[in-house]
Amino acid sequence: MDELQRKIEDHIKALSQFTATPDEGTTRLTYSKEDLQARAYIKEVMKSYGLVVREDGFGNIFGKLEGELEGPSVLIGSHFDSVPHGGDYDGPAGVIAGLEVAGLFFEKNIKPEYPLEVIALIEEEGSRFGGGLMGSRGMTGKLSEEDFARLKDKGGITTVEAMKAIGLNPALSKQRDPQSIKAFLELHIEQGPILEEKEIKIGIVESIVGLTQLEVTVEGKAGHAGTTPMDARSDALIAAAEAITQLPKLAIVEGSGTVITVGQLNVFPNGSNVIPNKVVFTIDIRSTVEDKMINVMEKAKEIILSANKTGVKTSIEQQLYMEPKYLNEEVRSILKEESTDLGIQHTSIHSGAGHDAMVFADVTAAGMIFIPSKDGLSHCPEEWSDAKDIATAVRILFETAKKLTGAKVSHG
């Protein structure tokens, strides 16, 4: 095992300790105690590599290596939050890759022409405040400060309250001037089986699926499970269930890889002998073709609204909408060239999952690479990727970052 691979494994092990569910996967929600622990570790590593560290008003972390020019920065990184009971690699692998690219600049005493910034983003998963991609959407102006401040978790705690609870400052500057960003690079685990099946270590992401997320609220009337006649009930859960069972066929009929998922379901008051008076659930719709995604979304809304009947009321809130994205052709070409020059086999690949790179693609030249996921698993404790593959990706990103920042390019 070489030194780079050892460092990567050490980082993975260290960050995996910051979980609210030890031995049951990684649960690291935004602005939690575990977020604060991971945050401290990331900032410490940044400082050890000579980076100037700061946080913005969302809690995104930046570690900057100044360039010879005061021009726009090349950003590299990913997110460090997780889904409940997730894995150790989804997000952190990309943050670690960014750290170790900066580490190679530090170790080799390379001074870039344009600044290099390692970035660790918050709330990509949307596990606490819904929607997802909050850190990247916020800093690029796609999520307003007002909308950010209105967001609440399931316990009714606002983003601002949660930030202050762990000592973060929501009054800091939030939006980033797009002119200050020269490019964005992200490494991510594939979260699928293609690279492993092909026995190829690097996927150059060509495009990212479009996605939208809806939050549906169904309100009825609570009552006693034994004394309320069946014909006198306004059962929110029955109404929700009848709607939910109709959703899968929408994606099947639309085709072209369109998918729909009901991932969260909360029932109130959640008593075994109480008729539910409220149900809140999420709908996640994805497609590579925007028109098909819109069609499914509109038909899903029709189904939900048709559940309105005597004693039952439904409402829908759109939490996120991102059209399908193609990543920057020039950056993709550089990633391919550097992979070839390093003798690393690679292939073009499409992402069926959403990533921060799709947000940055609207404001700068964005590029992304995948590494294999064992058995294609992700969002579960069994999620695993080889640190050797992460190290391979770091070397590609290092050479790419040198070229984008104007540093001298050499394959040492």
Image: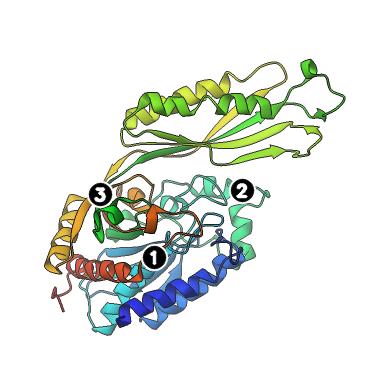
The location of residue 259, given as percent across then percent down, is 41, 35
Q: Left or right of 72: which side holds 354?
A: right
What label does residue 152 carry, if any? 2
- Coloration mode: rainbow
- Label 3, label 1: how far apart the Cα atoms are: 18 Å
User: In this view of the protein, which residue sits in the foreground, 102 or 112?
Assistant: 102
The location of residue 124, given as percent across then percent down, is 46, 53
Q: Visible in this render: residue 170? A: yes
Q: Secondary structure at mark 1?
A: helix
Q: Left or right of 123: which side holds 222?
A: right
User: In this view of the protein, which residue sits in the foreground, 392 or 294?
Assistant: 392
> Given the image, on which type of amino acid does mark 2 rest?
Lys
The location of residue 184, given as percent across then percent down, is 29, 59
Dot 3 surroundings within 10 Å: few (below 14), some, or many (20 or more)?
Answer: some
- Point out the tag, 2 or 1, that comes first from the N-terminus: 1
Q: In which image quadrant can residue 12 be found? A: bottom left
Residue that label 1 marks: 93
- Point out the tag, 3 or 2, that comes first from the N-terminus: 2
Dot 1 surroundings within 10 Å: few (below 14), some, or many (20 or more)?
Answer: many
As drawn, 233 above or below 350 = above
